Image (cartoon, rainbow, N blue to C red):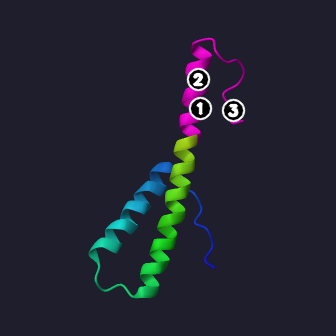
Amino acid sequence: MPSRPKSGGFEKDLKRLEEIVERLEEEEGLSLEESIKLFEEGVKLAASCRKQLTQAENKVVKLIKTVQGLAEGPLEEE
């Protein structure tokens, strides 16, 4: 089983995901094996991006609650 791609940060992961989608949509010369490998990498990158967005959203929600006096404590992940 191929190893999981290391996260390079949201922007880098998103850019790579966009490259994969573009390649899968445009290239007719890809073999089935190459297509599956790219698809697998894309699925993992999409999950990584989704996780990073969820973490960012949770921080924003907690920050807003803290500013409004509805929560206390650090903005660290729980």
**Picture residue at 40% right of the left edge, 57% below the top:** 15
What residue does disc 2 label?
Answer: 63
Farthest residue toward the top? 69
Instruction: Identify the element where label 1 is drawn.
Output: helix
Q: Is residue 8 magenta?
A: no
Residue 73: percent from left, percent from top: 72, 21
The residue at the point 47 percent across, 79 percent down is 36
Left or right of 25 in this view: 16: right
* Residue type of the residue flagged with mark 3: Glu
Kindly identify the amino acid type of the residue bearing the numbered disc 2: Leu
- Report the disc number at residue 59: 1
Count of numbered circles on the image: 3
Between the C-alphas of marks 1 and 2, the distance is 6 Å
| Quadrant into which the C terminus falls | top right
* Residue 44 visible in the shown view: yes
Residue that mark 3 sits on: 76
Q: Is residue 77 above or below residue 69?
A: below
How packed mark 1 is, by other alpha carbons closer than 10 Å (few <14, some 14-19, many 20 or more), is some
Identify which residue is drawn at 29% across, 78% down.
27
Question: Which quadrant of the structure image shows residue 58?
Answer: top right
